[in-house]
Image (cartoon, coloured by chain):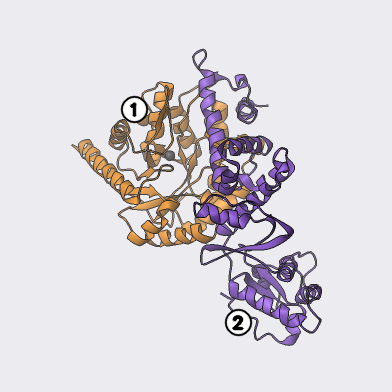
Chain colours: A purple, B orange
């Protein structure tokens, strides 16, 4: 190992795991090296705290200062950053609180974390085209047999077991958080963005199932098939068409594509599909 | 490397911060250019990207990164570099800068601008990597001196000699942060004017100014306050030594209204004008 590598591993190890930092080889008056190293140790912790506190205001409000700080310290120790952009540092918080004691004793924590993280994902997701309202109206009947939808990158689906949106609204309005309520069955929600504003809404169960399939790359007949669990056969095409229309109108949809999906393509992305296949109705601006 | 097909971004700029997005676009203040933190716009769409486009329509924009980790012994992160190059293709910045530091090792990011030991080994390592990055970007990079709070026993030369030598060997430019020079000079007990005097003037293409805070015996580069008088004095000295260099104010915390920063920038204009005048006289 080169001297430079040794030095960097020494300081990195000190920042990640603490210790006396002797391996770093700080030039300082006796007793002063610890103070100097301490400045970096503090800065490391504070910077990551700050990033997480920005991402998880609801979790902070719910836990209160002392417990939130404890959570952040444990998260930082468990999940050092592996992405150059600090934006992604908090990406495993919901998973962490769901899987680590004592946090896992409070199942609402994962929902609180996920609700805010999903909003963040929608807020600054990459831009994408939006299919114009009415773009699906004139499709010939045969087109529906192979139609797949590509969604705007800001569209995110989540299920919540708790009334976290009520807690979120209370926080936004500066009210005390209302009592938590656990749903008998998890409620499906959708997050998206339109005109640079973030939105979220709860979904009907059939709509959520249809969206999940479509987000996963299923074609329209497969979506219709799933809707049969809720609707009589003769109503299904109408329900499916009205769902698709509402998704387009709300700004969830970037494009549609027609024709068989090439082998190995898990999802149908508007841009790449357009260049590689003929006969599709590409994304509309 | 030749000239770049981008706006010049001379004069006096500000760091673009989201708190000021609307103000900048609606009031179009007297600022000659804006500097963005590259990472904040690499993958993002929505509001950040929209405002970047709007600001870009009215002002030259330069790019300033915090994640290049030019001094790390890890391999260069080409995922990062591709994103940086894509963003540059969109922004067409007059300058792309990052820091003379390392930010992590063994694929773990410490998200801090950590100082390097000033050794021949580090010098060769950094200069080689700067060349690789410049090759990849097809243009020169500016490297900024960071504030530091510790130095290493194994250092063989001063920070200013190290920086000047990296710039010469790699044929890159320098972003001189005058506040960082001041902070480090205080923390390590050297004369900040010696540092500035040692800078190869032709390579210094941008200057940063910022506020800092006091923590016991040390100064910390917090960018959360107004620029203090000794840093203004040092800036005047820098202008005297280096000539009229594009200058900007960085403010990252405790962010005041845009008008306050524009006013602080007016002070930079006055000080630079006086210093250039004295220099000529
Ligand atoms: Fe700076």
Q: Is residue A4 left or right of residue A224?
A: left
Q: Residue furthest top?
A: A30
Residue B70 in view, yes or no: no
Q: Where is mark 2, residue-wise?
A: A134
Residue B220 percent location from the top left of the image = 44, 30
Name which quarter of the figure residue A229 lies in.
bottom right
Residue A36 percent location from the top left of the image = 51, 23
Which callout, 1 or 2, points to the residue nearer the camera? 2
B260 vs A285: above or below: above
Mark 1 belongs to which subunit? B
- Residue A208 is marked as none
Name which quarter of the figure residue B185 lies in.
top left
Question: Which image quarter is the C terminus of chain B in?
Answer: top left
Residue A225 percent location from the top left of the image = 81, 75
Mark 2 belongs to which subunit? A
Q: Residue at x 39, y 24 (%)?
A: B186
- Residue B193 is marked as 1
């Amino acid at each position: 190992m080169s001297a430079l590598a040794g030095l960097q591993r020494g300081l990195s190890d000190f920042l990640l795991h603490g210790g006396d930092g002797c391996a770093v080889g700080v030039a300082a008056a006796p007793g002063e090296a610890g103070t100097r190293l301490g400045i970096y140790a503090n800065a490391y912790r504070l910077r990551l705290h700050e990033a997480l506190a920005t991402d998880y205001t609801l979790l902070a409000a719910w836990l209160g200062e002392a417990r939130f700080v404890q959570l952040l310290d444990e998260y930082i120790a468990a999940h050092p950053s592996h992405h150059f952009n600090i934006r992604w540092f908090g990406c495993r918080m919901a998973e962490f609180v769901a899987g680590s004691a004592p946090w896992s004793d409070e199942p609402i924590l994962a929902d609180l974390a996920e609700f805010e993280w999903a909003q963040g994902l929608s807020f600054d997701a990459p831009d994408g085209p939006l299919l114009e309202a009415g773009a699906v109206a004139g499709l010939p009947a045969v087109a529906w047999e192979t139609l797949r939808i590509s969604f705007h990158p800001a569209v995110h689906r989540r299920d919540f077991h708790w009334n976290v949106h009520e807690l979120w609204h209370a926080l936004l309005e500066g009210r005390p958080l209302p009592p938590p309520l656990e749903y008998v069955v998890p409620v499906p929600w959708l997050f998206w963005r339109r005109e640079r504003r973030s939105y979220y809404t709860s979904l009907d169960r059939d709509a959520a199932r249809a969206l999940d399939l479509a987000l996963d790359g299923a074609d329209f007949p497969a979506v219709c098939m799933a809707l049969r669990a809720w609707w009589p056969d003769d109503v299904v095409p109408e329900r499916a068409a009205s769902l698709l229309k509402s998704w387009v109108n709300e700004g969830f949809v970037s494009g549609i594509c027609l024709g068989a999906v090439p082998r190995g393509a898990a999802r149908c992305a508007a841009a790449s599909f357009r260049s590689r296949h003929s006969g599709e109705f590409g994304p509309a601006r | 490397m030749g000239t770049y097909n981008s706006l010049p971004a001379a004069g006096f700029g500000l760091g673009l911060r989201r708190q000021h997005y609307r103000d900048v676009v609606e009031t179009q203040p007297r600022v000659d250019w804006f500097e963005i933190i590259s990472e904040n716009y690499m993958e993002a769409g929505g509001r950040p990207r929209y405002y970047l486009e709007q600001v870009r329509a009215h002002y030259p924009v330069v790019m300033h990164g915090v994640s290049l980790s030019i001094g790390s012994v890890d391999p260069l992160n080409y995922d990062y570099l591709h994103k940086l190059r894509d963003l540059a293709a969109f922004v067409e910045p007059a300058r792309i800068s990052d820091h003379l530091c390392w930010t992590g090792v063994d694929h773990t990011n410490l998200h801090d601008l950590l100082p390097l030991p000033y050794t021949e080994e580090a010098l060769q390592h950094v200069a080689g990597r700067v060349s690789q990055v410049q090759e990849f970007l097809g243009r020169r990079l500016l490297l900024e001196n960071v504030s530091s709070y510790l130095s290493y026993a194994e250092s063989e030369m001063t920070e200013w000699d190290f920086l000047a030598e990296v710039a010469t060997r790699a044929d890159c430019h320098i972003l001189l942060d005058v506040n960082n020079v001041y902070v480090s000079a205080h923390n390590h007990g050297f004369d900040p004017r010696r540092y500035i005097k040692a800078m190869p003037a032709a390579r210094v293409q941008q200057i940063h100014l910022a506020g800092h805070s006091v923590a016991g015996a040390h100064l910390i580069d917090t960018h959360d306050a107004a620029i203090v008088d000794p840093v203004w004095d040092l800036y005047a000295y820098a202008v005297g030594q280096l000539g009229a260099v594009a200058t900007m104010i960085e403010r990252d915390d405790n962010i005041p209204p845009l008008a306050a920063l524009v006013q602080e920038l007016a002070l930079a204009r006055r000080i630079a004008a006086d210093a250039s005048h004295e220099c000529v006289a």
